[in-house]
Amino acid sequence: MIEKSELLRVPAFTDLPDDQIAWFLSQSQEMHLKAGDTYVRQGDPADSMFVILEGQFQWRGEFGGETVVLSGKPGDVTGVLPFSRMKQFTVSGRAVTDGRVLKFPASLFSELVQKMPELTTRLVGMMSDRIREATRFEQQRDRLASLGKLSAGLAHELNNPASAAKRAASQLRDILKKIRDASLELGRRDLTSAQKSEIEKLEASFTQQDVVPPDALTVSDLEDQIDSLLRSHGQNDLWQLAAGLARRNVRPEVLESLFANLDGDTARAALVRISASVEVASLLHEIESSTGRISDLVGAIKEYTYMDQAAVQNVDIVKSLETTLTILNHKLKQGVAVQRDYQRVPLLVNSFGSELNQVWTNIIDNAIDAMHGKGELRVRTYREDTCVVVEIGDNGPGISPEVKPHIFEPFFTTKGVGEGTGLGLDTVQRIVKKHRGNIQVSSQPGDTRFQVWLPLADAPP
């Protein structure tokens, strides 16, 4: 039999009148549990409130493919609480050690509210804290999930140019050896100043000019012509040089001067060095292009996160949108065409820049998912009175009338288990309201549009 003094030691029941404590005990059931016993299972009707009197307990459940574990200790009030809308237990409760709990039926909550108003107030406060903590947990998990998706895409985007630069740098070692060997061979030749000048002139003309790569058919034709020229001069084993020269758009008639002014062996050494220099120029261009792409991506990441910048500042909306599109390029390039319609005049919003990027990311990411990765994404900006309007649309199947009223509700999602937490658009709405803005959505098959209104930086409050 539980004494009143034992229940009064529970923080939620401290200082409550004896008659109220007596009534609560008379309506409750004391449960003695052994270590490992389960007293509530996930999915059971939420029909009881529990007061932990003795022992250690644990709540465990699955959320979005992840296991969540919460501990319970003496003095905790758990389970369903008054005014809670929970219909089923979302976690299972088990005893970690031997212990005791007091079980109060939810069917008596209406009487509890009347007979124990002070306890009711305390329990409502506990429920509010629990909701805030659960929301904070889900939001953090949603942010981590979004970060994980962005990180995976960026890793892929960075890996491609990094691999290309590494591959080109590795190839440079072999080619530089070819240049060295060919140069040594030419050094042993008794060349006139005119002959040396001719070789250097050809080499410079092939390597210094910015060449627009010809199309594949032209390259193939040039390769055959260069190969035929080399064979006509007895150089039957230099066919591998033809491809590199053809890619640089080298004409066979230009190479003819080498064989006209030099003997066969000297022309061969000169051709090997020139061809190797051409390859070096191509590889250097590839390295510059790849490292430039890496630099652009790193710059986009810094812009996206507003790293090394003030937390609050005037943000150029178009620049913010373009940075987000760069970050999401790994998803867009799979089959999404982006149509831009930006107002030419810069539209500035005083904002937490990284938070606005989160708004664009969530809306664009949802649009891509709605189109299953293939379709048309439309991004538009314009000014309306003292606000900038950002419109993001897609030509996906649209949002059904049944779903549309709920899309901004916390934890509402149409995605499968483990694919979404239902906090994306709730987060979007909270950020927009934080910036004194507004968000609306219109949708029909083939035309879904999210419109975000944000006050311009120079607009009166």
Image: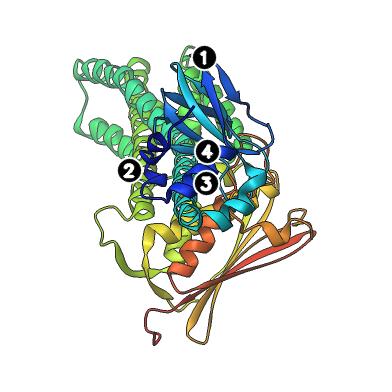
N-terminal of the pair, mark 3 or mark 2, is 2
* Residues under numbered marks 1 and 2 in contact, where contact means CB atoms less than 8 Å apart: no
For marks 4 and 1 on the same chain, the one whose residue lies earlier in the sequence: 4
Percent across and percent down for residue 96 are 45, 18
Q: Residues within 10 Å of mark 4 (few under 14, many from 20)?
A: some
In the picture of the structure, the residue carrying the numbered disc 4 is: 25
- Tell me: 328 left or right of 401: left
Q: Secondary structure at mark 1?
A: loop
Q: Which residue is mark 1?
A: 36
Three-letter amino acid code at disc 1? Answer: Gly
Q: Nearer the viewer, mark 1 or mark 3?
A: 1
Question: Is residue 393 shown left or right of residue 36?
Answer: right
At x 46%, y 30%, the residue is 2
Q: Name the secondary structure under disc 2.
A: helix
Foreground label between 4 and 1: 4
Most foreground residue, 413 or 216: 413
**Spot occupied by residue 262 in the image (x, y as percentages of width and height):** 33, 24
The residue at which mark 3 appears reads as 329
